Image (spheres, rainbow, N blue to C red):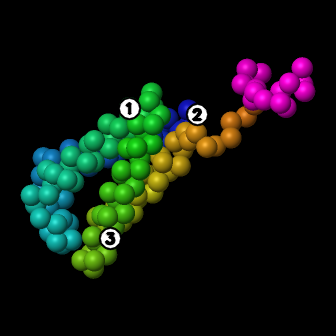
């Protein structure tokens, strides 16, 4: 579990940095955005806002699991769209590969999120199912 927390925290930190850079219209990212035909006005919303909200959601997900799952799902969707935008503009520069890397980080965070449908190992305090089978064990 410790490794998952470190990985999710690093993913959140990377997205927070990227989102804040977009919100501040950092000069280093402007040429890449222009190359991908992304208007500069989009840096504030949706790009910067969604990235920082995703980072905050990932961090909140360390304590509220469903929030982390929702944030990771949103970031995966965001970066799928980002990769598509770069492909559509035939932009395969550094920001395209950064989008691929961010997509991989978001997908790894989503994969590590707790899900109610995954089987949990039955431990000493595991809840036993109720019903006719449990009556036979008594």
- Residue at the extreme front: 132
Q: Residues within 10 Å of mark 1 (few under 14, many from 20)?
A: some
Q: Residues within 10 Å of mark 2 (few under 14, many from 20)?
A: few
| Dominant SS in magenta | loop
User: Dot 3 corresponds to which residue?
Assistant: 84
Secondary structure, mark 2, is loop
Rendered residue at 15%/47% (across/down):
23
Rendering coords of residue 38 (x, y %) = 16, 66
Q: Residues within 10 Å of mark 3 (few under 14, many from 20)?
A: some
Rendered residue at 28%/48% (across/down):
51
Rendering coords of residue 37 (x, y %) = 16, 71
Quadrant showing the N terminus: top right
Mark 3 or 2: the one toward you: 3
Secondary structure, mark 3, is helix
Query: Is tag 1's residue or tag 2's residue first in the polypeptide sequence?
Result: 2
User: Dot 2 corresponds to which residue?
Assistant: 1
């Amino acid at each position: 579990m410790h490794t998952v927390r470190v990985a999710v925290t690093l993913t959140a930190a990377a997205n927070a940095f990227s989102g804040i850079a977009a919100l501040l219209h950092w000069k280093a990212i402007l040429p890449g955005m222009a190359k991908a035909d992304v208007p500069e006005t989009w840096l504030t919303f949706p790009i910067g806002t969604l990235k920082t909200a995703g980072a905050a959601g990932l961090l909140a997900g360390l304590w509220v699991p469903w929030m982390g799952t929702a944030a990771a799902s949103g970031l995966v969707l965001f970066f799928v769209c980002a990769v598509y935008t770069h492909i559509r503009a035939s932009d395969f520069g550094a920001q395209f590969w950064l989008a691929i890397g961010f997509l991989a980080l978001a997908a790894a965070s989503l994969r590590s999120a707790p899900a109610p449908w995954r089987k949990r190992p039955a431990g000493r305090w595991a809840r036993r199912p109720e019903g006719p089978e449990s009556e036979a064990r008594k």
